[in-house]
Amino acid sequence: MMEKNAKIYVAGHRGMVGSAIVRELERQGYTNIITRTHAELDLCRQDQVEKFFEEEKPDYVFLAAAKVGGIVANSEALADFMYDNMMLEMNVIHAAWKNGCKKLEFLGSSCIYPRMAPQPMKESCLLTSELEKTNEAYALAKISGLKFCEYLNKQYGTDYISLMPTNLYGPNDNYHPTHSHVLPALIRHFHEAKEQNLPYVTCWGDGSPLREFLYVDDLANLCVFLMNNYSGDETVNAGSGKEITIKGLTELVAKVIGYEGEIRWDTSKPNGTPRKLLDVSKAASLGWTYKTELEDGIRLSYEDFLNNPMRAER
């Protein structure tokens, strides 16, 4: 168990996941949380990361920093996504090990699993067949981070764990017009359509793919729970275990935002993977389950969007 006064470093504390982990740690009474902005510490620079760890020597590390984006960003910047993610995770994990960090938790993504993995996807299906091409670079980087933690455990007896979240949403999400994920993109899309009184909104694909969503504060709760209750080489899936079609999701977002126009589908645009549902029985067997239902979470996310003055720039 993490001591309440232990020195805890949250990498990526300004992002959606990192900021949620900081909120959850504070809620649970942890008092010694350390953070650094990108301007203060560039995690892609090994010299800076090593200097930081030598000076601070954190007891526990939550590695939530990553270069992330949706289908468009991922497929247009494959090299950038691979380089940045590989560098930052290798630097942080290696420096943590060199400086005697008691426990590290690495956060990946459900895109690490094969494109046509049996559904729902168990942790054991990792590396059993080929990846989804549109985010292969990101997935390869995340698999490498997960495996590096596993190899350190095996070679050096560390207690480094990883978890793989499904699609996340919530406060501090990225609402960029082209570089955001599906749910925040829909929130922005329908909000602008409502503001401009547009008669219809066009969405990509045909609305048939199934997706699972987890509210980010629920993920943060699981992150702290696993840090205190789980050790093992195999990753742990983080999800709700429930799925919804993109069409159903779109209608739900329109309902929450109060957009009453027509929803049209551009079937010339890609659908992405047909189905991505995580098997969450492992987390459940450890005694954890999600709390926030999708409609409630979308409502909370929309409130955050309305109160987020940077939303247009991000």
Image (cartoon, rainbow, N blue to C red):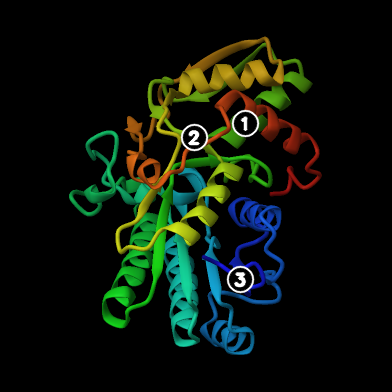
Residue 13, percent across and down?
65, 61
Nearest the camera: 216 or 246?
216
Residue 30, percent across and down?
67, 63
Give the CA distance from mark 2 to mark 1. Answer: 10 Å
| Residue type pointed to by label 2 | Phe
Residue 225, percent across and down?
51, 53
Name the mark on residue 46: none
- Check if mark 2's residue and mark 1's residue have beta carbons within 8 Å: yes
Name the mark on residue 297: 1
Give the answer, above or below, for where 22 lies relative to 262.
below
Q: Nearer the viewer, mark 2 or mark 3?
A: 3
What residue lies at 32% left-to-right and 79% top-to-bottom?
A: 157
What residue lies at 61% left-to-right and 75% top-to-bottom?
A: 42
Give the CA distance from mark 2 to mark 3. Answer: 26 Å
What is the secondary structure assignment of the residue under circle 1?
A: helix
Give the answer, above or below, for where 208 lies relative to 87.
above
What is the secondary structure assignment of the residue under circle 2?
A: strand
Q: Which residue is mark 3?
A: 9
Residue farthest left in this picture: 128
